[in-house]
């Protein structure tokens, strides 16, 4: 066992904070500061500091489990477990066809595992039915970004640009709790004289740091953005030169915005006209400004249009494709970006290629050694796939996800999972979903394996193995290799992550998310490489086509927009830290305005369900809590669910601090202690979604889907409140 520190990255959120890991005598690792990584500069949140706790043998799975005739999950050998999975998947395909087998992945899988899972589904199983929980993360922002810019990358610039901007509007993000190390960039923004505007229906810890906090009614972010654009137009703040030179579609978007006058928007959102005017002033007066969105505006049945409206605001004011300005999305899951770029998403192939594009199919099929016609077409989105379990989809292979807790309308999804003919789960712990499986396979964790992830900036990173996994634990790549062999595909599924990455490079070459110029050696020498990063041959060809004389010349040091990583392989493409500075990724190089108009959420309050519910996260837990709920320090800080209620609403209900309160929607009932606070709007309640059982917030949430992104409406649904043990209350 090595005793030196291994530089690597945190297993949790999309910051992918740098850290050092040193093996300890108990077989786990000790976390220490890694100040050289620019995203966190050594800072770590509680989740990152305590991540090694889940490596302990008494916390995690160390043996395959197979359900016996009595219905219990019992230890089994790897051969028995793998044979059972392969046999059941084969039987389902033979009896019901390949699309009767589903595959569901996770945003925590490395690029190599996400790539291999997508290949396994399409080449070995021949199924179109694959998607992943990243659909619940930033799919609406991705769809809007592709419509407007021709390309989706969470942030089109590094986080280090934020403090240098003049103003940042942060929409629906509580970074102080979800990504604490990133808050320093916003603190530095203010120290540098910039302005922070936070838009959130709650006065969160992040909102408390803002120069201006707007608290709109949940589900009205679209109207708010349109109202701001209306004022930009009315006050003569449109950057007409930029709009004329770098965009298209302005007149239709302008007409749509003009229908949302300030007083109308005030009635919809609850944000006053003076606050709207002040927001426009603060955003437009500096030379540079940004809009950053997160799950608040995105997790809506109109999330794509909502993000599109914020992008329109950036375009009209010349705030995209310019230094220290732009629109960006704050990706949530650790590898939510890379997970969809390389094949887990129902409609995408590696390199962010579209599955229904004949040229994309031909390219990837050649890399995979199969015919293009053998690849299935696009399948169902995540919620639609889960909703089809037990009917059209009879067997499911699930990796690194816990939809029993994290999916909308979770009680219904739990029923669908229970109705499957067969469920196999690969995970590091016995999650609530794994506990329902017929076979559970224990797999390696972040510190026990090497692989790449792509953080919210589009920075591809190398996570390094620091320790060996316990006996009885295998990697997901080994699982897919063994299953492929049992299902008749002996080659094409290597277990070495670097070998997989080399194939991924070829598969992504020439695609929107081009990784072909990135190597493990390079990632080991640099603090990540930003995609797109074509191989040198392709980069030179592209430079010639675009008339660039010195593609690989070092940038001028006084030009932050042209800054590249400090260290890079000589002669290699430098990567692309900043997108769109010269042109957008559209056929004509222009950004596209998309006209949008306000519409209501799918389920407005009424007499029976008069209150709005919105959901979110707390600092000490992560996603479904499957891992963080096993860490004593984190549980001490956040032991269970709660319902955040304004004092006026609590008084009408007759509830006091800590009283059990039932929150009831058309989909079910959840019970949790009341937390009474003026930080929430009087017409709204908030619940975090990390817990199962009677406090499961996603029992209540609405699966109404955005028509473009297929994102469920997690952020707003109608509920009523009841004091437990009493009759229905208001």
Image (cartoon, grey):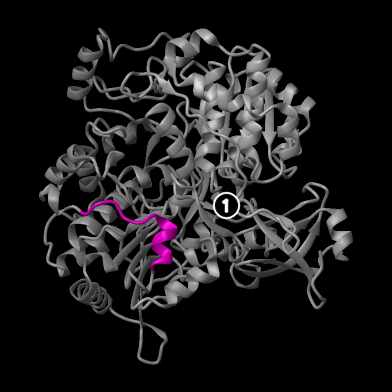
Q: Secondary structure at mark 1?
A: helix
Relative side of 79 to 667, left or right? left
The stretch drawn in magenta includes residue 382: yes
* Label 1 neighbour load within 10 Å: few <14, some 14-19, many 20+: many
Q: Which of the two residues, 570 or 455, is positioned nearer the viewer here?
A: 455
Residue 689 against residue 81 in the figure, above or below = above
**Viewer-side residue, 560 vs 652:** 652
Residue linked to disc 1: 47
Quadrant housing residue 701: bottom right
Outermost bottom residue = 70
Q: Which residues are magenta?
A: 376-388
Residue at 60% across, 46% down = 178
In the image: residue 109, left or right of residue 82: right
The spot of residue 140 in percent (x, y) is 48, 42
Question: Where's the C terminus, which quadrant?
Answer: bottom right
Residue 496 lies in the magenta stretch: no
Residue 324 x, y percent position in the rendering: 53, 18
Residue drawn 60% across and 23% down? Answer: 163
């Amino acid at each position: 066992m090595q005793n030196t520190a291994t530089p690597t990255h945190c297993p949790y959120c999309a910051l992918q904070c740098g850290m050092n890991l040193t093996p300890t005598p108990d077989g786990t690792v000790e976390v220490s500061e890694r100040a050289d990584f620019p995203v966190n500069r050594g800072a770590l949140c509680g989740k990152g500091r305590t991540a090694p706790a889940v490596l302990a043998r008494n916390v995690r799975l160390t043996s395959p489990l197979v359900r016996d005739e009595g219905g219990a999950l019992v230890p089994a050998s790897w051969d028995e477990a793998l044979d059972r999975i392969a046999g059941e998947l084969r039987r389902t395909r033979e009896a019901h066809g390949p699309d009767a087998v589903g595959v569901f992945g996770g945003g925590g899988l490395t690029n190599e595992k996400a790539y291999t899972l997508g290949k396994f589904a399409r080449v070995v199983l021949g199924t179109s039915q694959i998607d992943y929980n990243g659909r619940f993360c930033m799919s609406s922002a991705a769809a809007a970004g592709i419509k407007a810019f021709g390309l989706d990358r969470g942030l089109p610039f590094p986080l280090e640009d934020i403090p240098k901007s003049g103003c940042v509007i942060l929409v629906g993000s509580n970074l102080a709790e979800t990504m604490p190390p990133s808050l320093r960039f916003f603190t530095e923004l203010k120290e540098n004289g910039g302005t922070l505007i936070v838009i959130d229906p709650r006065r969160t810890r992040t909102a408390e740091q803002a120069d201006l906090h707007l608290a709109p009614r949940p589900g009205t972010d679209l109207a708010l953005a349109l109202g701001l654009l209306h004022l930009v137009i009315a006050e003569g703040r449109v950057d007409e030169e930029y709009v004329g030179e770098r965009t298209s579609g302005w007149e239709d978007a302008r007409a749509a915005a003009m229908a949302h006058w300030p007083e109308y928007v005030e009635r919809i959102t609850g944000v006053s006209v003076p606050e709207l005017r002040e927001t426009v002033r603060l955003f437009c007066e500096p030379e540079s400004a940004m809009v950053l969105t997160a799950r608040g505006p995105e997790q809506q049945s109109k999330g794509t249009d909502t993000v599109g409206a914020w992008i329109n605001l950036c375009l009209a004011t010349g705030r995209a494709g310019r230094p220290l300005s732009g629109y960006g999305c704050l990706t949530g899951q650790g590898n939510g970006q890379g997970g969809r770029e390389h094949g887990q998403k129902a409609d995408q192939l590696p390199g962010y290629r579209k599955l229904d594009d004949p040229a994309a199919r031909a390219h990837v099929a050649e890399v995979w050694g199969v015919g293009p016609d053998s690849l299935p077409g696009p399948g169902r989105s995540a919620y639609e796939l889960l909703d089809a379990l037990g009917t059209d989809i009879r067997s499911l292979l699930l990796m690194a996800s816990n939809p029993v807790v994290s999916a909308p309308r979770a009680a219904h999804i739990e029923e669908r999972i229970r109705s499957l003919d067969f469920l196999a789960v690969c995970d590091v712990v016995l999650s609530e979903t794994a506990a329902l499986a017929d076979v559970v396979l224990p797999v390696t964790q972040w510190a026990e394996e090497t692989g790449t992830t792509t953080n919210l900036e589009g920075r591809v990173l190398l996570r390094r193995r620091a320790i060996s996994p316990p006996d009885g634990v295998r990697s997901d790549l080994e699982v897919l290799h063994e299953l492929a062999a049992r299902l008749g595909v002996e080659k094409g599924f290597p277990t070495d992550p670097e070998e997989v990455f080399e194939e991924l490079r070829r598969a992504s070459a020439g695609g929107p998310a081009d990784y072909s110029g990135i190597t493990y050696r390079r990632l080991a020498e640099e603090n990540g490489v930003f995609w797109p990063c074509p191989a040198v041959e392709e980069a030179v060809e592209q430079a010639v086509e675009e008339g660039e004389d010195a593609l690989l010349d070092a940038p001028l040091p006084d030009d932050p927009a042209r800054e590249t990583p400090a260290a890079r392989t000589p002669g290699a493409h430098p990567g692309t830290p900043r997108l769109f500075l010269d042109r957008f990724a559209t056929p004509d190089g222009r950004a596209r305005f998309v006209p949008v108009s306000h519409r209501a959420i799918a389920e407005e309050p009424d007499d029976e369900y008069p209150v709005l519910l919105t959901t979110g996260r707390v600092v000490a837990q992560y996603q479904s809590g499957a891992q963080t709920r096993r860490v004593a320090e984190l549980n001490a800080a956040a032991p269970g669910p709660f319902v955040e209620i304004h004092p006026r609403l609590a008084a009408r209900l007759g509830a006091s601090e800590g009283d059990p309160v039932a929150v009831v929607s058309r989909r079910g009932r959840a019970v949790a202690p009341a937390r009474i606070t003026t930080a929430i709007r009087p017409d709204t309640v908030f619940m975090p979604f990390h817990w199962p059982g009677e406090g499961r917030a996603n029992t209540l949430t609405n699966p109404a889907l955005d028509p473009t992104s297929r994102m469920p409406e997690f952020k707003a649904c109608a509920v009523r409140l009841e004091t437990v043990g009493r009759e229905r209350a208001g």
